[in-house]
Image (cartoon, rainbow, N blue to C red):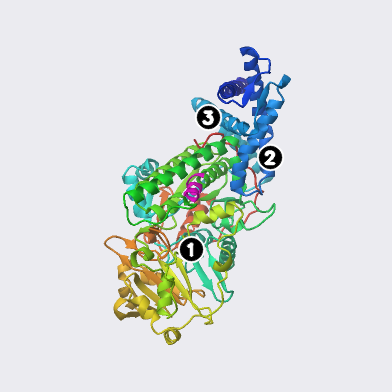
């Protein structure tokens, strides 16, 4: 035992010395390259003296980074997350200036702007060296992870907190946002995701499930995490009783939707027992939160939605690595966009403006922070973790769901999954990793591009209202845009879009290839008779347009050619909606009874031969309505878990399956009925996840 401790201490000391040596050499090299950075007095020094000066400066910088850096980042936790990421570089440079000021005889001098560069390079080199040594000494790295996890477990046991037990396995739910069942099958069969493909061969099973009519993250994730997505007709909709537009990716709306779901089910959510929610729209009842939209509108110390940023940026090397990847991804997006224009690829949407930065945030920053948070949760031994990786969904909206752009994203997702699986081997409890998605993506040219007018223009024309000569574009509702705005502490879709002007003009909203039309001056839901009396040509204009598949109004489905089917007449809607796939009529029938269903619901046309739809937003890969792969996400589970129903329909049904798996894991015994509710336990206080220096390389 004593020999083992001495060996561990000796190994750690050797690693510290080697990292120090690498930092010293880096500092010497930078002093020789950069004109504004020197490590000698004005009279000149010997090579030995310069080397000692560099060693002194590197040691002081490393010590300050280890002692002061976490305190600085925690003090800045309420600073907007993206601003914090930028401040990392300037704070790191300030630490270097302080370290150089401690060198005797004033031998270390550097300009402030050069200090930022030197500090960033030294942090990256130190992190890379530490990681390389840990990889070479795998036993030492393994012991370190076990020691971190065991320390955390003993602390939980002393506090009597949940998750401190040894026997029950934990569960990690990884949501691959927007990756449909067929997309995953193509990726695993084509070699893009070797980790997932290996699991399917050895340890996991895969099955599709069907979304509700509103095939988008807000409805699906609310149902999965909280057991109810009742009265969520779309991604955004107008509520006449409040005069507001509810948008699933607006923090205040997400909080309200979560509150409604909890009131309806009487249960806080899937993750109430020692759970963690990472990168999601909703908390799932978890106490451990990071990048959760429904709590991001709160202010003050009680808001832990940005805690994941602190954990990640507490290591300055993480900021350096992520910043480099961020810039590379933005440049890559610009290159891909230019290439698509030069080749005349169609369909195509605008990918300029801030989109390259938004894409880089979703595919780099959010991915890195969420993965780091999940790793910390596993090493802390938490019972259940639900994390959303949004990268594929964001890129597919603008590049299309199939192609080189999204293939690259799927490859990176597979590497993130592999990293999480490797870390799970060192966790204090066994972990079962479940992969799932919230919806798929259907390709197709936008409605505006195909027909030269937006849905709003078509509705206004049908109402006899003036239509702008210039076709208006409907902004994308991708989740990443809300995440960026939240990280900057800016409201999401405020102003006129949140509170439309009251009047007789219809409010027209879009959710992928699902459109919603509401008449603010009509109390309650407008009847078909009243709509036709006020606007005789509107319903016929919509139902017979070639870009429209069907229209729901007042319990009736209208389709091209004057076809009509009442939802309360058995078989009529099933026959009319058969081209949209099995269960389409039931999905429409369920939405028809929602209190906040729009006066008119419009689903775009769908081509079964190509799987194409026409988004009413600026998206060539879309989801939100019926038609094609968007309605067929996947569920992939370890074989030791109970088999889900063969025909899994609706996010609420998925919630039941996941809850059953968690309950079986807690009891580690026979399966129990899905209706049973878990016992609430005291929640632990939030804690910082263990440091995994360089683990995301």
Nearer to us in this view, 52 or 443: 52
Residue at numbered disc 2:
72
Q: Is residue 448 magenta?
A: no
Which mark is in front, 1 or 2?
2
Inspect this view and state whether residue 648 appears: yes
> CA gap, disc 1 to disc 2?
39 Å
Residue 361 is a magenta residue:
yes
Instruction: Name the secondary structure under disc 3.
Output: helix
Relative horizontal placement of residue 684, taking residue 397 as reference (left or right): right
Report the magenta residues as a range.
356-364
Confirm or deny contact between disc 3 and disc 2 (CB under 8 A): no
Under circle 2, the secondary element is: helix
Q: Earlier in the sequence, mark 3 or mark 2?
A: 2
Looking at this view, is 667 or 205 the one in front?
A: 205
* Secondary element type, mark 1: helix
- Number of numbered discs overlaid on the protein picture: 3
Q: CA distance from mark 3 to mark 2?
A: 23 Å
Query: Which mark sits nearer the N-terminus, 3 or 1?
Result: 3
* Dominant secondary structure, magenta: helix
Q: Is residue 211 above or below residue 386?
A: below
Q: Residue 411 appears at what percent x and percent y?
A: 40, 43
For the residues labelled 1 and 2, say whether their Cβ atoms are less than 8 Å apart. Answer: no
Residue ranking furthest to the left: 609
Q: Which residue is mark 3?
A: 128
Check residue 219 in the rendering and tell me which mark sits there, or answer none: 1
């Amino acid at each position: 035992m004593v020999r083992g401790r001495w060996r561990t201490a000796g190994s750690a000391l050797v690693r510290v010395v080697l990292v120090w040596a690498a930092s010293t050499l880096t500092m010497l090299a930078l002093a020789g390259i950069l004109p504004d950075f020197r490590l000698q007095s004005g009279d000149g020094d010997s090579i030995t003296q310069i080397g000692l000066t560099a060693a002194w400066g590197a040691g002081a910088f490393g010590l300050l980074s280890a002692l002061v850096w976490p305190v600085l980042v925690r003090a800045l936790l309420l600073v907007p997350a993206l601003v914090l990421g930028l401040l990392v570089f300037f704070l790191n440079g300030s630490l270097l200036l302080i370290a150089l000021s401690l060198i005797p005889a004033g031998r270390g001098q550097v300009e402030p702007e050069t200090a930022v560069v030197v500090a960033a390079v030294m942090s990256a080199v130190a992190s890379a060296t530490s990681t390389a040594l840990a990889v070479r000494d795998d036993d030492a790295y393994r012991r370190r992870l076990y020691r971190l996890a065991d320390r955390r477990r003993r602390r939980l046991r002393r506090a009597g907190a949940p998750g401190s037990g040894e026997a029950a396995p934990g569960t990690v739910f990884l949501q691959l946002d927007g990756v449909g069942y067929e997309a995953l099958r193509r990726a695993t069969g084509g070699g893009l995701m070797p980790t997932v493909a290996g699991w399917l061969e050895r340890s996991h099973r895969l099955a599709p499930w069907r979304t509700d009519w509103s095939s988008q993250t807000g409805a699906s994730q609310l149902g999965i995490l909280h057991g109810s997505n009742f009265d969520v007709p779309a991604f955004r909709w107008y509520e006449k009783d409040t005069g507001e537009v509810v948008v699933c990716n607006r923090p205040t709306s997400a909080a309200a939707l979560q509150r409604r779901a909890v009131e309806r089910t009487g249960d806080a959510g899937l993750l109430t027992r020692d759970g963690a929610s990472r990168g999601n729209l909703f908390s799932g009842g978890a106490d451990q939160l990071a990048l959760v939209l429904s709590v991001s509108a709160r202010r003050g110390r009680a808001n832990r939605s940005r805690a994941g940023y602190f954990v990640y940026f507490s290591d300055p090397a993480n900021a350096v690595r992520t910043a480099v990847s961020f810039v590379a991804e933005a440049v890559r997006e610009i290159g891909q966009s230019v290439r698509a224009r030069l080749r005349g690829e169609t369909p195509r949407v605008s990918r300029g403006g801030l989109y390259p930065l938004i894409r880089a945030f979703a595919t780099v920053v959010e991915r890195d922070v969420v993965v780091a948070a999940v790793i910390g949760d596993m090493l802390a031994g938490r019972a259940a973790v639900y994390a959303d990786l949004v990268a594929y969904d964001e890129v597919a909206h603008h590049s299309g769901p199939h192609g080189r752009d999204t293939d690259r994203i799927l490859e990176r997702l597979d590497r993130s999954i592999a990293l999480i699986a490797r870390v799970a081997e060192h966790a204090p409890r066994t972990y079962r990793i479940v992969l799932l998605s919230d919806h798929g993506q259907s390709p197709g040219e936008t409605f505006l591009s195909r027909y030269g007018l937006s849905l709003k223009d078509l509705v206004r024309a049908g109402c006899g209202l003036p239509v702008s000569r210039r076709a208006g574009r409907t902004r994308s509702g991708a989740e990443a845009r809300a995440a960026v705005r939240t990280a900057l502490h800016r409201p999401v879709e405020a102003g006129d879009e949140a509170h439309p002007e009251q009047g007789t003009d219809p409010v027209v909203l879009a959710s992928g290839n699902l459109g919603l039309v509401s008449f603010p001056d009509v109390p309650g839901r407008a009847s078909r008779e009243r709509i036709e009396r006020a606007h005789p040509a509107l319903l016929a204009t919509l139902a017979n347009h070639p870009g429209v598949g069907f229209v729901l109004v007042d319990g009736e489905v209208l389709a091209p050619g004057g076809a009509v089917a009442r939802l309360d007449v058995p078989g009529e809607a099933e026959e009319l909606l058969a081209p949209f796939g099995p269960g389409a009529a039931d999905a429409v029938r369920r939405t028809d009874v929602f209190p906040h269903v729009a006066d008119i619901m419009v689903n775009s046309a769908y081509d079964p031969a190509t799987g194409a739809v026409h988004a009413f937003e600026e998206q060539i890969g879309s989801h939100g309505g019926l038609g094609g792969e968007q309605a067929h996400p996947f569920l992939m589970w370890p074989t030791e878990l109970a088999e889900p129903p063969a025909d899994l329909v609706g996010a609420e049904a998925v919630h039941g399956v996941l809850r059953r798996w968690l309950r079986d894991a807690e009891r580690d015994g026979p399966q129990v009925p899905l209706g049973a509710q878990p016992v609430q336990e005291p929640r632990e206080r939030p804690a910082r996840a263990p440091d995994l220096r360089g683990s995301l390389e």
